[in-house]
C-alpha cells in the first residue's frame, strides 16, 4: 500500500540528483553538441544558458563573443576579475581564484557549461564534470605555449558556446588591426621590445611565445634572445644584474602586478645597471599593468594591449616614460 | 699563539673571499678583465660591474656576514647552547615577519624598515629567552632548537599569509622568504648605520662580562658582573645585529651556526677570542657562499639563502652528532 507513494517520493528526490551528477544536464531544448577537449570528446548543450568560467582566458573569450557568464575566477593576485575587463563583467559572481576553485560557489550557479584552464587538475576535473560538462583545452606538456595556443583556446571556448562565427570575426578584426599597427611601428621587423617584471634582485623577462609576447611578436617586434629561447616556460628566472644588457632593447615594458607601476619604475631607476640600458637612456621605458600583460589572454586583452601600445608608442610621450 | 694563527687564517680567508667576490659574477666580466681594470686598462664594462655591482654587494655581504656570525656567537654563549643561532631560533623569522607586516601597512622607507626589523628581532629574542627559561627546554640544546623551529614555523606561515593578502608579485615575496645580496648596495648600508653602530658598541662592551658568565652565574657575580643585565644586553645586541642582517639581505638560513663553530674549532671556546674571529670569518664564509650563488645558474643567480642552507644543514647535523655536545 505504502510502496507506491514511497517509490514516487524516492524518484522525485533521486531523479534530479542523478541528473545533476551524470554531467548530462539537459539543456532547455535537450539538444547536445560534441566537442573535442583534453579529456576526449565531451557533449555540451547546444545553447548553453548558464556558463561559469574558471580561467582568465575563458572569461575573455566568452565576453568577446557576447556571452555574459554567471561566475568567473578572480585574476592572479587579485580579489576580482582583471581591471581591463571589469566593466564588461559587472554582474559576474567570483567563484574562487585561478588556483583555488570554490566548488560550492560553482555549484550554486547551477551551470550548464564550465570553461576551464588547460592546467586544471585531474581531481578538479572529475568533480567539476559531475556538476556540468567541463571544457578543458588540450595542451602540449612539452610546448605549452605553441603557435597560436591562446587563439585555439579562445576558439574552443567559443565553439563550446556555439559562437564559432563570432570568434572568427573577432580574430579577423584583431589581425587587421595588428597588421595596420605593424606597418606603423615595425615595418622592417627590427624594433626590439622587452617585456619584463622588475625586481631589485634582477628582472624576469617574459617569453615571446606567451600571450602578450605573442602579440608583440605579431606586431613585428623582436624579443631579446633570452626570451626567444624559452620553450616550455612563460618567463626566465631572475636575471643577474650583471647580465641586464641581455634584456636591453629599443623599448622596455615593465609589468607590475600590484598597480604600483611608479614604485617599480622608481626602484628600477635606483639601480645603476638599469640606468645604463640603451632603452632607459632614450627614455623608452613604459610601465604596463601586469594583470593584463602577464596574467590575461584572449581577444579582448589583445585589443587592450594594442590600445596601450598605440597610445604609448605612437601618441604623445606618455607621462610614465622614464624621465631623463 | 693559537689565537694569532686563527686570526691570521681568518684574515687570509676574508682576503681570498673578497677577491673572489670582486672577480667573479654571473655576468661576462672575467677575473682577467677585472685584473686589467685594476691595472688601469678599462674596457668600460669591467669597471662598471666591479664598482657598481660587485663591490657594493660585497660590502653588504661583509656587514651581514659579520653581524650574523657575531649574533650567532652571542646567542650560543647566552643560551649556553652550541646550536643556537638567529635563524634556527626564529629571531630572523620574527624580524622578517615584522618587516613584511610593515610593508603591508605601507612602509617603503628602508631606514624605517631596519628599525622594524630590529624590533621584530627583539620580540624573537624575548621569546627565545622565555623558552630557554622553561624547565627542561633550556637545559637541552635540542629542545631549545625545537622550540625555535616551532616559532619559526608559525612566523613563516604568518609571512606567507600576509604576502598572499598583499597580492605582490611572487618575485618580491622570494626576497623575504629566502635572503639574497643581489641588488643591495650602499643605500641599504646607510639605512642600517645607526642600529649597526649601536650593536657594535654593545658587543665591545659585553665581551668581558659574557666571558665571565660562561664560568657560571656565581663566578660572574663574584667578579662584579651582573648576569641578568648582561643577558638582557646581549639579547639586545643580538636583536640589533639580526635586524640589521635581515633588513640588508633578508633571512639567511643557518649562517649564525656555521661561523662560531668554525671559530671555536680554530681558537677554542673563549668568547673574547671567538668574537673577533667571527667578525672576520663571517664575511669570508658569506662572500664565498654568495660567489657560489652567482656561479651556479648563470645567467641567473641563486638566492644566497639557498646556498647557506645547503652548507649549513650538514654542519648542524655534524654538531648534533658530535659525540658530546659541548656545553657552553
Image (spheres, coloured by chain):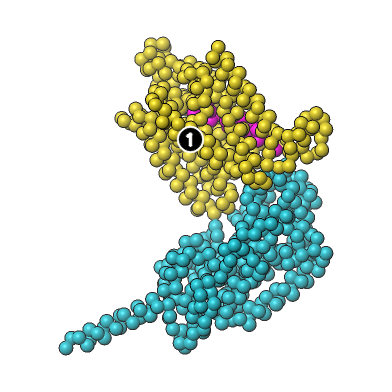
The location of residue A210, given as percent across then percent down, is 64, 62
What is the drawing colour of chain A?
cyan
The location of residue B323, given as percent across then percent down, is 39, 26
Give the position of the N terminus of chain A as an image quadrant: bottom left
| Residue B55 is inside the magenta segment | yes
What residue does disc 1 label? Answer: B314
Q: Secondary structure at mark 1?
A: helix
The span shown in magenta is B53-72
Residue in view at x 59 percent, y 62 percent: A142
> Which secondary structure is most common in the magenta stretch?
helix
Residue in view at x 50 percent, y 35 percent: B312
Sort mark 1 into few (<14), some (14-19) or many (20+) by Cα contacts within 10 Å.
few
Residue in view at x 55 percent, y 62 percent: A75
Evaluate whether residue B110 shows in this view.
no
Q: Which chain is yellow?
A: B
Looking at the image, residue A67 lies above or below residue A117: below
Evaluate whether residue A276 shows in this view.
yes
Amino acid at each position: 500500500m505504502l510502496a507506491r507513494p514511497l517509490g514516487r517520493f524516492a524518484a522525485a528526490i533521486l531523479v534530479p540528483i542523478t541528473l545533476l551528477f551524470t554531467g548530462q544536464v539537459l539543456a532547455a531544448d535537450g539538444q547536445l553538441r560534441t566537442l573535442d577537449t583534453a579529456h576526449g570528446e565531451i557533449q555540451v548543450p547546444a545553447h548553453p544558458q548558464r556558463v561559469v568560467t574558471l580561467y582568465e582566458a575563458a572569461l575573455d573569450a566568452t565576453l568577446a563573443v557576447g556571452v555574459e557568464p554567471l561566475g568567473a575566477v578572480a585574476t592572479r593576485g587579485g580579489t576580482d576579475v582583471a581591471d581591463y575587463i571589469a566593466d564588461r563583467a559587472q554582474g559576474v559572481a567570483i567563484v574562487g581564484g585561478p588556483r583555488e576553485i570554490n566548488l560550492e560557489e560553482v555549484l550554486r550557479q547551477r551551470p550548464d557549461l564550465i570553461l576551464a584552464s588547460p592546467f586544471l587538475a585531474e581531481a578538479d576535473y572529475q568533480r567539476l564534470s559531475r556538476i556540468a560538462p567541463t571544457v578543458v583545452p588540450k595542451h602540449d606538456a612539452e610546448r605549452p605555449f605553441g603557435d597560436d595556443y591562446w587563439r585555439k583556446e579562445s576558439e574552443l571556448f567559443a565553439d563550446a558556446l556555439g559562437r564559432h562565427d563570432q570568434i572568427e570575426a573577432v580574430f579577423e578584426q584583431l589581425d587587421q588591426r595588428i597588421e595596420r599597427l605593424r606597418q606603423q611601428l615595425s615595418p622592417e621587423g627590427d624594433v626590439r621590445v622587452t617585456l619584463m617584471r622588475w625586481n631589485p634582485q634582477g628582472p624576469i623577462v617574459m617569453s615571446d611565445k606567451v600571450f602578450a609576447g605573442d602579440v608583440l611578436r605579431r606586431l613585428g617586434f623582436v624579443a631579446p634572445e633570452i626570451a626567444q629561447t624559452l620553450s616550455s616556460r612563460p618567463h626566465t628566472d631572475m636575471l643577474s644584474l650583471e647580465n641586464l644588457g641581455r634584456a636591453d632593447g629599443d623599448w622596455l615594458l615593465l609589468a607590475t602586478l600590484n598597480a604600483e607601476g611608479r614604485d617599480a619604475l622608481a626602484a628600477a631607476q635606483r639601480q645603476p645597471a638599469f640606468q645604463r640600458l640603451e632603452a632607459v637612456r632614450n627614455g623608452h621605458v613604459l610601465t604596463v599593468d601586469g594583470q593584463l600583460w602577464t596574467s590575461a589572454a584572449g581577444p579582448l586583452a589583445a585589443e587592450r594591449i594594442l590600445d596601450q601600445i598605440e597610445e604609448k608608442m605612437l601618441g604623445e610621450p606618455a607621462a610614465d616614460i622614464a624621465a631623463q | 699563539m693559537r689565537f694569532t694563527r686563527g686570526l691570521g687564517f681568518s684574515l687570509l680567508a676574508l682576503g681570498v673571499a673578497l677577491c673572489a667576490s670582486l672577480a667573479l659574477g654571473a655576468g661576462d666580466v672575467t677575473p682577467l678583465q677585472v685584473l686589467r681594470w685594476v691595472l688601469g686598462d678599462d674596457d668600460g664594462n669591467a669597471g662598471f660591474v666591479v664598482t657598481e655591482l660587485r663591490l657594493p654587494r660585497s660590502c653588504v655581504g661583509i656587514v651581514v656576514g659579520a653581524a650574523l656570525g657575531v649574533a650567532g656567537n652571542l646567542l650560543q654563549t647566552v643560551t649556553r647552547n652550541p646550536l643556537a643561532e638567529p635563524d634556527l631560533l626564529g629571531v630572523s623569522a620574527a624580524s622578517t615577519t615584522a618587516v613584511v607586516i610593515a610593508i603591508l601597512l605601507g612602509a617603503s622607507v628602508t631606514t624605517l624598515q631596519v628599525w622594524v626589523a630590529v624590533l621584530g628581532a627583539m620580540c624573537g629574542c624575548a621569546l627565545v629567552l622565555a623558552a630557554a627559561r622553561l624547565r627542561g627546554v633550556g637545559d637541552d640544546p635540542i629542545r631549545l632548537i625545537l622550540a625555535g623551529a616551532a616559532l619559526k614555523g608559525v612566523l613563516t606561515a604568518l609571512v606567507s599569509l600576509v604576502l598572499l593578502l598583499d597580492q605582490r608579485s611572487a618575485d618580491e615575496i622570494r626576497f623575504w622568504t629566502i635572503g639574497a645580496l643581489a641588488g643591495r648596495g650602499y643605500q641599504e648600508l646607510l639605512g642600517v648605520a645607526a642600529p649597526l653602530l649601536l650593536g657594535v658598541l654593545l658587543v665591545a662592551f659585553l665581551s668581558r662580562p659574557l666571558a665571565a658568565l660562561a664560568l657560571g652565574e656565581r663566578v660572574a657575580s663574584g667578579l662584579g658582573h651582573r648576569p641578568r643585565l648582561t643577558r638582557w644586553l646581549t639579547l639586545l645586541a643580538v636583536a640589533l645585529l639580526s635586524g640589521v642582517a635581515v633588513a640588508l639581505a633578508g633571512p639567511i638560513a643557518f649562517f649564525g651556526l656555521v661561523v662560531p663553530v668554525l671559530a671555536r674549532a680554530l681558537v677554542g671556546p673563549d668568547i673574547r677570542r671567538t668574537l673577533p674571529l667571527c667578525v672576520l670569518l663571517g664575511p669570508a664564509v658569506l662572500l664565498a657562499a654568495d660567489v657560489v650563488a652567482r656561479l651556479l645558474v648563470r645567467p641567473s643567480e641563486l638566492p644566497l639563502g639557498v646556498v647557506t642552507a645547503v652548507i649549513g644543514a650538514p654542519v648542524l647535523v655534524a654538531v648534533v652528532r658530535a659525540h658530546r655536545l659541548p656545553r657552553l
